[in-house]
Image (cartoon, rainbow, N blue to C red):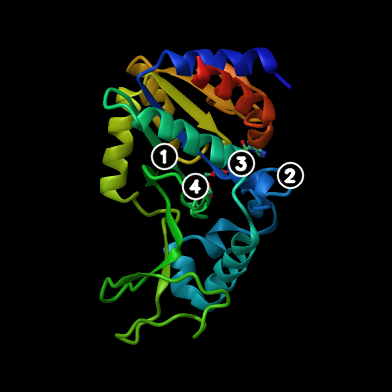
Amino acid sequence: MEEGKIRDLATFISSAKSISVLTGAGISQESGIPTFRGADGLWKQYRAEDLATPEAFSRNPTLVWEWYAWRRATISRAQPNAAHYALVDLESRFNGSQAHSFTLLTQNVDGLHERAGSRNVVRLHGDIWQLRCPSCGTERQDYSVPLDPFPPRCSCSFLMRPGVVWFGEPLPQREWERAAVAARKAEIFLVVGTSALVHPAASLPLLGKQNGARVVEINPDPTPISRLADLVIRGKAAEVFGAQWRENQRTANSN
Ligand code: OAD
């Protein structure tokens, strides 16, 4: 474990006034939710073109819904881990002061950040617990596992779709604008558990860097961010934000 670097991160954070964080599937890996591109990643077993595109949904909505229903079931059994909770703590430290700001940008649709207690979350790729009607635009939250009826229908009788962003679709505009503002104003831009291969989300750390942020990456494996990062912590998120991190924060808070 990279204790020296974890202390460096704590020092960076203690002198910063604004912090933005971009998370990806890796932050939920230790909660038991599979990532997309690792050795056991979802895109090793399934083809994104068959399951996560508007064309796939038009071709075979039941197949797409079966895959989302399976993911909803996996996520419903998972609990937030130490990394999710560490980001809740950081937010409360930062947003407790008017002069400080903290924004959490996530590509994850699992909702574990919110379940842990994060408030200022920008969901770049939507929400697996939201259902949306492609016909009348109705949106609703539905946490039931299994879904009933399956596949879910709108009151206008059209088939609902998952409220997530699929390949080939634009990011929700308001979220993207909030993310770009947060990237530009960040003094520290923390990148946790993303392969940084899916754009435009993956371009946010670069936008931060170009506007003066120190970029810090937490990831067991190299990514395109590693080259531009000022600090790279090679480790799993829940281990990096484990007991030692909590002890450092406790000491920093009591000083
Ligand atoms: P990926 O699966 O592409 O990348 C996960 C990253 O997490 C990899 O770089 C891993 O090395 C790292 N990782 C694995 N375990 C970790 C751990 N315990 N702690 C920290 N890091 C760990 O997932 P994303 O980058 O989130 O989009 O993928 C981006 C988008 O591609 C997703 O939102 C999804 C996917 O296709 C859509 O479905 C549109």
Image quadrant in which the N terminus is located: top right
Which residue matches tag 4?
113
Real-space Cα distance between discs 1 and 3? 14 Å
- The residue beneath circle 2 is 39
Mark closest to the chain's N terminus, 3 or 2: 3
Q: Nearer the viewer, mark 2 or mark 4?
A: 4
Q: Are marks 4 and 1 in contact (CB under 8 Å)?
A: no
Alpha carbon of mark 4 to alpha carbon of mark 3: how far?
13 Å
Q: What label does residue 105 carry, if any? A: 1
Foreground residue among 225 and 185: 185
Q: Is mark 3 within 8 Å of ligand 1?
A: yes
Residue 189: x percent and y percent? 44, 24
Q: Give the number of the mark in front: 4 or 1.
A: 4
> Residue 140: horizontal and vertical position, in percent?
35, 70
Residue beneath disc 3: 26
Q: Mark 2: which amino acid?
A: Ala
Q: Is residue 246 left or right of residue 255?
A: right
Out of 13 and 38, give the one closest to the viewer.
13
Label 3 amino acid? Answer: Gly
Q: Residue furthest front?
A: 254
Q: Earlier in the sequence, mark 2 or mark 4?
A: 2
Q: Name the amino acid, label 4.
A: His
Is 134 displayed left or right of 59 in the figure?
Answer: left
- Label 1 crowding class (10 Å Cα cut-off): few <14, some 14-19, many 20+? many
- Number of residues whose C-alpha sits closer than 10 Å to that of mark 3, classed few (under 14), some (14–19) or many (20 or more): many
Looking at the image, tell me whether mark 4 or mark 1 is earlier in sequence order.
1
* Dot 3 and dot 2 residues touching (CB under 8 Å): no
Q: Is residue 230 visible?
A: no
- First in sequence, mark 4 or 3: give its number: 3
Q: Earlier in the sequence, mark 1 or mark 2?
A: 2
Element type at mark 1: strand
2 and 4 marks in contact (CB < 8 Å): no
